[in-house]
Amino acid sequence: MIKYPKYKYFYAIADFLILCASFVASEYISERIFHKRILADVDLPTTHLINVIFSLFFIFIFQNNNLYKINIFLSRSSQIVSIIKSFIYGGLILILISFFLQLDIVLGSRTVAVTFIMLGISSITFCRVVILKPLYFYFTKYNLIKRNVVIVGSGKSSKLLAEKILFENFYGINILGFIDNESTSGKFIYGNIRSLGGMNKLEKIVSNVKVDEIIIATDDIDYERLLQIIDYCNTLHLNVKLSSELFRIIPEKIVTESYSGIPLIDLSEKVNKNINIIFKRGFDVAASVLGLLVLSPLLLSVSLIIKLTSKGKVLFSQERIGKNGKKFNLYKFRSMIDVPESEEEHKKWVRALIKESYENDSVLTKIVNEKRVTRIGKFLRKTSIDELPQLFNVIKGDMSLVGPRPCLPYEYEVFDEWHKRRHSVLPGCTGVWQINGRGSVSFKDSIILDLYYVNNATPWLDLQLIIKTFPVMLTGRGAK
C-alpha cells in the first residue's frame, strides 16, 4: 500500500486534470488558430489515451523535481522554478522520444508541443500559487487540515524540532507528544507538550489515538539502535521521518522534505514489498534484454577492441556478495592487464581503507593499480562501459538494475552488523550511492545512502535513478 499524506494525492490529481485540460486546449488552439493538428488520422479514444499518458508522464517529472514536497509547495520561488524545469525537461524528453522512435503520433507538430508547454506552465503555476497555496493556509489555520505527529526523543534535537513546528507551523501539524524511554509518562518536555511514555507504549498509543506521522529525532544514539527504532516504527504502517546528524549525508546529497528549515528524511515503506519485488524483477529482465539488444553493436565492438589491444579474456569475473550475504560471480569487461596479483595484499589495503574511512569519516577512495589499467580500460572505467556485462547478472537474478553496490567477500567480513542491512535486497548496477556520492563520500556515508534506498525502494525511484545514471556515465563523475 502506498503511504503518502492525503494532500499530496490531492495535488497530484489537480495537476493531472490541469495537464489533461492543457493538452486538449493546446490541440484545439493549434488546430483552430495555427491550423496545425497533432493527430491527423487518429480516432478520439486514441487521442484521450495519449492525453492520459502525457499527463501521467509529467506527474512523474513533477515528482522527480520535488513538486510534492511540502516545503517546495509552500515556497513561491522554488515552486515556480521547479515547474519551469519540469516542463523544459519533460518537453525535451518527449521531443527526443518522438525523434528517435519516429512517432509522429506523439508530437506531430512543434506548434502543439510549444503551446502545451506554455499553457501547462501558466495554468499549473496559477492553480498552485494563486489557488491551492492560499487554500492550504486557510485549511491549516482553521484546523481543517491537521496531521497528528509524535516525536521519538526528548533531547535537544526533538525540542528544537517541536519549537520550530509550533512557532512556524504552516503545515497543519499537531504534536501529540514525545516518546522517550528516559522520561516519565506525563512529564512536560517542551511547553505544554508531554511525554507519552517509552517505546514500549508507542503501539498502544497508535492504536488508541489517530497518529499520522512519527518523527524520530533522538540524540546520543548509535547506528544500530537508531535503525532498530526505524524498523519498529515501520511495523506500525505510518509515515516515518527522521531528523538525525547520523544521517546528515542524505539531505546533503538528496533533496528531502523539511519542516521550518529542518530537513526530514522519509524512511517509511511506500509500496508493498512483495508487489515491488515482483514488479522490479519483471522490469529488470525486460529492460536488461532490451538493453543487450540495443547495445549489442557497442558490446561487440568493445569486446573486439579488448581482444585486439591486450592479452587475456574479454570478460572479467569476480566473486561478490549479493542478497542476504549470498556469493555470486559479477561480470565486467576486462580493463586491466591480465596478470597474477597478490589477493592478500589487496585484502589488507581494502580493510585498512575501510577502517580509516570509518574512523576518520574520510572519503572512501577506490584502490586501483594504474599501471595495470589498459588504454581502452581507462575509457571503459571512466564511462562505466566496463560494467555493461552486469546486465547478464541481472537476467540471471544475481543483481537488479538498481540497488546497493555489491561488495567483495573480504569487505563483507569487516562490516558491522548494521552495514550488512544493505544486503537485504539484490545489489544493483546503479543506485543512490553511485548517483549522489560516487567518489565523494566516506564509507559510512555510502552505507547510509544505500540504506536510504532499501527503505525507499519504489518503481518510480528506480526509474529516476536509471535516468540519472546516463549523465553520470557520460561525464565519468567519480569514476576511477
Image (cartoon, helix red, strand yellow):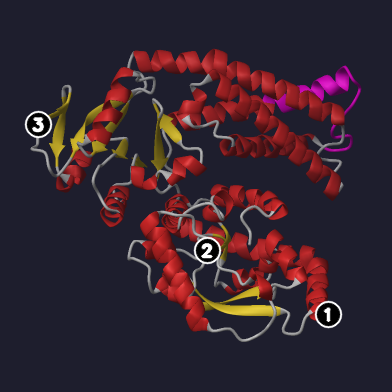
Residue 74 visible in this rendered orientation of the protein: yes
Which residue is depicted at the point 90% across and 20% down? Answer: 34
| Place of residue 237 in the rendered image (x, y in percent of width and height, measured from the top left) | 33, 46
Q: Quadrant of residue 177?
A: top left
Whether label 3 touches label 2, CB < 8 Å: no
User: Which of the marked residues, 3 or 1, is nearer the chain's N terminus?
Assistant: 3
Amino acid found under the numbered disc labelled 2: Arg
Residue depicted at x 39% and y 25%: 260
Q: Earlier in the sequence, mark 1 or mark 2?
A: 1
Report the side of 428 relative to 390 (left or right). left
Of the numbered discs 3 and 2, the one sitting upstream in the chain is 3
The one nearer the camera, 459 or 437, is 437
Q: What residue type is labelled 3?
A: Lys
> What residue did someone put label 3 on?
187
Helix, strand or loop at mark 2: loop
What span is colored magenta in the figure?
Answer: 21-42
Residue holding disc 1? 308
Q: Name the residue under label 2.
A: 405
